[in-house]
Image (cartoon, helix red, strand yellow):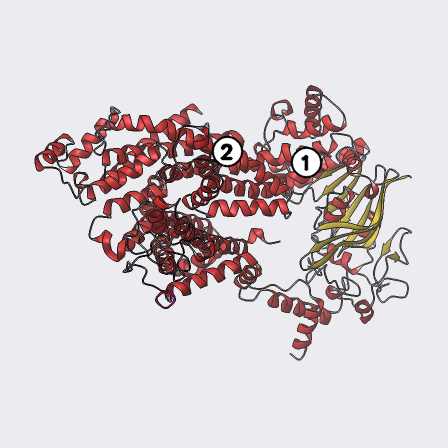
Amino acid sequence: MLKYTIRRLLLMIPTLFFVALITFALAKAAPGSPFDKNPDKPPRQEIVDRWIKFYGLDKPVHEQFILYMSNIVHLDFGTSIRRQRAVSDILGQGFPVTAQLGIQALILALAVALPLGVISALKQNTMVDYASLFFATVGTTIPSFVMAIFFIYIFALGLHLFPITGWGTPQHMVMPTVILALGAAAFLARITRASMLEAIRQDYVRTARSKGLREQVVIVGHVLKNAMIPVATVVGPAAAGLITGSFIIETFFSVPGIGREYILSITALDYPVIMATTLLYAFFIVVANLSVDLVYGMLDPRIKVAK
Amino acid sequence: MATASTTQERAAELNFARKQRSLWGDAAYRLFRNKAAVGGLVIIVSAFLIAIFAQFLAPYNPIEIPQNPASQMEPLWTGSKYTDPRYLLGTDFLGRDIVSRLIYASRISMVVGFVPTFIVFGLGVTVGMTAGFFGGWLDQLLMRFTDIIYAFPDFLFLLIIVASFRASPFGKLLDGLLLIFVAIAIVGWVGVARLTRGQVLALKEREFVEAARAVGATPRRIMTKHLFPNALAPLIVTAAFAVPSAILNEATLSFLGVGIIPPTPSWGQMINEGFPLFASNPWAVLLPAICISVVMLSFTFVGDGLRDALDPRMKT
Amino acid sequence: MAELLEVTDLHTQFFTRDGVVRAVDGVSFHVAAGETLGIVGESGCGKSVTALSLMRLIPQPPGKIVRGSIMFDGQDILKMDDDDVRGIRGNNIAMIFQDPMTSLNPVLTISRQISEALELHLKMDKSEARKRTIELLELVNIPSAKKRVDDYPHQFSGGMRQRVMIAMALSCNPKLILADEPTTALDVTIQAQILDLLKNLAREFRTAFILITHDLGVVAGMTQRINVMYAGRIVEKADTVELFANPKMPYTWGLLRSIPRLDESRRAKLVPIEGLPPDLIAPPPGCKFEPRCQYRHDVCREKEPDLVHIPNSKPDHDARCWGTQEGGWLVDTDWKREIGDTHVLEVIKQETASVTATETPGV
């Protein structure tokens, strides 16, 4: 198990390298410069020159990339052009906020989706099932920022229950968390329902019933454990979806996390921040996929991870 | 031979097994029995017609700012004092008619939904079939490449591409639409290629392909006549979901201010423009949000319907 | 001999979108304690549904037992409440399913799956149940049972898994075991082993068995009596020796002709039954087998024969056939010699071909 995990972790390095390379190439290919973002008041040329020298932008592109990568190895992510601060500083400040938002949303999503999917499957073709299917369809279909608009209109502007923007108090966190969780919850509920229905009609369930087990024991002891295997494999992609969703939600609700910082950096072509954040996101996705594989190996005895 | 017709009559009368339709006929039958899917289809077709005939349907120019703008008017039904009988759904912050802008914006969504999907599938299916069928270095390259792409969240990749080239001359073509097409295609084709490859790998081992090979069919013939038709069902379902996902991507990019270049209206971009004034004029934001929701739901219903109709495991 | 199981006029139907499938249509039979009964027929003729009905394991909806009674040990299973039925399942009646690959839960250990029933019905604690599980595995000849008890199903071969299924069925000393095609999914060499095991255990435990199979060859050495089923009905019943020596229904003849036999002369060819079993939503009005029968007369098409005693046969030998009944045209027919009317055979082939053709357009 340990050996496998280490090997998978090592395999992440080339993947992350190429992610860095692609992002770097795209940022370099972009026309314009991060220093002309304010057309009304262009900075004086000597200041721009000094900046260019400071950021090493006068060197050939491949040297810039090599320099950047060697800095990353020393965990030096450079300096933000837009904010004139160390990137690691900015990320260090935003990350706890994003992590809190993401984890809250994931927990909420799982807490809603699993019971909903299971109940829906057990009560197939009843009103409960149709209601949860409707929820799942709407939740996976309506984009989060559109959902956010409806939520703000009803709960903030209409009912004055929650503030529209900001972060810090629990009231601030409710809407971003719920909306971020919604898509993942809907997606997971759909998968849970489908995989419950798949598991429940397997032969071994009939065997379990033929032993005289009570229906609850059949469901909990025989169906659930099998049904959770496919669900576990999509928690990774769902978490990745939360990561992607978080920067739209953060932008929308002015949550001071790395997602909002990312969007602001992208429009400002602040490539040190873009690079570092992209790598961070990619890192989390790779780790999420790895942990899915490990959990999968634990849940399904047919898969031997430890080889 | 005289017995032939009576034999058939007798066979029909005996009714050994229920009559079966062909695979596609069966699927179409089930699709059209699905009320949600039919409803979705009707809405999508209407949206298409609205997009095509936008210039006849829209009462005002969606871009031009009126001479004496009555800005931020609310829809007539709200009955507030900020309404203007000339503007059924009110006006935006520059005084432009929201009805007209919504109608013209449907063009962006429809085009952005279908054009990149065609590119994505053309490219993805070709590469995926070739890689799956021949294997070798192309297959290796594809798999390594998808590993990397999978580490990028789709939308993040899209965002970086669009943000990088937005300021270039190419990024300004067709109000930024062309860049969005290309970006969606670049991000999307890999997934389709991988799906196709998987299908081909599974089908390749099946007896009917073996049989075709045994009678000397060329690889090209096997691919087009045997593999492609059999891999088609999952591809159609994927495509049905790729269209709304492309619409969503455009809307999100435009909402973030890096999509369609103003003043050309798109639903996402209308939300972006209206959002700062959401509290004072909510309908300028809510209406495009509703449009996006309805179109997205319609596509999902059709996609779900297609999946249920085509997935033989769902047969009861 | 007191009857352990007495099934009377059992009707099990499935309510589908296309209509009502009469999967079991008025079946009656009985099994005495310790007796072994074979139920034989092609796939889709209602054998498995009969077995599942006995344990009330028919998925509902769409299935439903609409009529009949199943007296087991003096009680009607169909009138019991759910708790009582569960008390019987696995405890008094156990079942062995066809496919050992899918009938065991892949994510639970063998020990867990067998102990479960022991803990439930025999109120054993965990360590007792485990001990008993190992004994059971040894009983069904699983090598190094002590070590293998904590393995998962995928670590066993198909034959070994079926042994596990048998151990599971035996675990609570049931009075009746239903074995639904227990060897169909296995290799031929393994089939013989499993059948031997079943036979020995049945004798040893004095358990009544119902062996369900499509293969008359399987029941030959196993059972005391045989019911032949076709299209949801019993079409012939007799004790095993009598049925093989003196079959009285063209469907049974067909089944017998289609099994390879070593003791027959080399010239005897294997002859398949032409055509397909009927659609159980709209079955033929007369004899259900008539559309495929080479010996048919007009009466077969018009009226369905009853299951009645056949002349020139042992007392308990009944069949559902106009031809072999008193005064019928098949009373003296030697089924081994006379294959039937070859012209009718041609017509059946044509009919089958035209049905198959209309069924699958575009292929």
C267 on left or right of B114: right
Chain part drawn in magenta: B57-61
B263 part of magenta stretch: no
Quarter of the view holding residue B226: bottom left
The type of residue carrying mark 1 is: Ala
Residue furthest top in the image = C127
Quarter of the view holding residue C313: bottom right
Q: Which residue is denoted by mark 1 in the rendering?
A: A208
Residue furthest left in the image = A46
C192 on left or right of A45: right
Residue C321 appears in the figure: yes
Numbered circles on residues, count? 2
Residue B141 appears in the figure: no
Image point (68%, 61%), residue name: C276
Quarter of the view holding residue C184: top right
**Residue A125 on image: x %, y %:** 63, 48
**Residue C294 on image: x %, y %:** 75, 66
Q: Which residue is denoted by mark 2 in the rendering?
A: A108
**Residue B177 on image: x %, y %:** 29, 55
Task: Give the mark nearest the N terminus, 2 or 1.
Answer: 2
User: SS for tag 1?
Assistant: helix
Residue furthest bottom in the image = B2
User: Compared with residue A58, is residue C316 higher up or lower down, i.e. above or below?
Assistant: below
Q: Residues within 10 Å of mark 1 (few under 14, many from 20)?
A: many
User: Compared with residue C189, is residue C170 higher up or lower down, i.e. above or below?
Assistant: above
**Residue B234 on image: x %, y %:** 47, 53
Majority SS type along the magenta span: loop
C232 on left or right of B173: right
The type of residue carrying mark 2 is: Leu
